[in-house]
Amino acid sequence: MGNNKGALLVYAVIGLALIGVVTQLFTNTASFLTSIFTMLGFGIAIFAIMYFVFFKKRTPSNDAKKYKQAVKQSKAKYSSQQTKPKTPSKRPQPFSFKKKSNKRPSHLRVIDGNKSKRKNRANF
């Protein structure tokens, strides 16, 4: 029951606001439009200030840049390998071996460890 009273109160306030907006629109149109454009201008100005001060200066981290570059390379590598299915030709082609050309270097790197400092397991 308490929830119904709250919903009725909200609907009543919204209804009164609509009646006030409609009467203001018909009785004093110029000041109504001026106040609407003023509110919109202030809203856009506040949004622009917040966007350029807080959100624009965020630069992605070095890890994010490396991840995006790896994704870009991976898409370029695997999208070129996807080809259309071949339609069967009228004559069978003789089987031939073709050499791969223009192999791209891997985007992965080998990290050298401490190979010279191997521990002697017999000492344990």
Image (cartoon, rainbow, N blue to C red):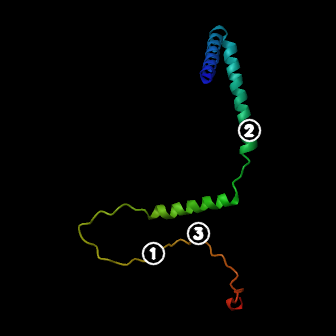
Q: Residue at x 67, y 10 (%)?
A: 28
Instruction: Count neighbours of disc 3 (C-alpha within 10 A) and say few if under 14, some if 14 to 19, many if 20 or more.
Output: few
Residue at (76% x, 42% y) in the render:
53
The quadrant of the image that shows the C terminus is: bottom right
Q: CA distance from mark 3 to mark 2?
A: 39 Å
Whether 63 is drawn above or below 56: the answer is: below
Label 1: which residue? 100
Which dot, 2 or 1, sits closer to the camera?
A: 2
Considering the numbered disc 1 on the image, is that residue within a helix, a strand or a loop?
Answer: loop
Instruction: First in sequence, mark 3 or 2: give its number.
Output: 2
**Can you tell which of label 1 and label 3 is closer to the viewer?**
3
| Distance of label 2 from label 1 (alpha carbons) | 54 Å
What is the three-letter code of the residue carrying label 1? Lys
Category of crowding for the residue at label 1, using alpha-carbon neighbours closer than 10 angstroms: few (below 14), some (14–19), many (at least 20): few
Point out residue 15 in the picture as x, y percentages from the top left corner: 61, 15
The residue at which mark 2 appears reads as 50
Quarter assignment of residue 41: top right
Residue receiving disc 3: 107
Task: Quadrant for the N terminus, please.
Answer: top right
Q: Secondary structure at mark 3?
A: loop
Name above or below for residue 5 compared with residue 98.
Answer: above
The disc labelled 3 sits on which kind of residue?
Answer: His
Mark 2: amino acid: Met
First along the sequence among labels 1 and 3: 1
Q: Residue furthest front?
A: 1
Q: Position of residue 38 (x, y in %)?
A: 71, 23
As helix, strand or loop, the secondary structure at mark 2 comes to helix
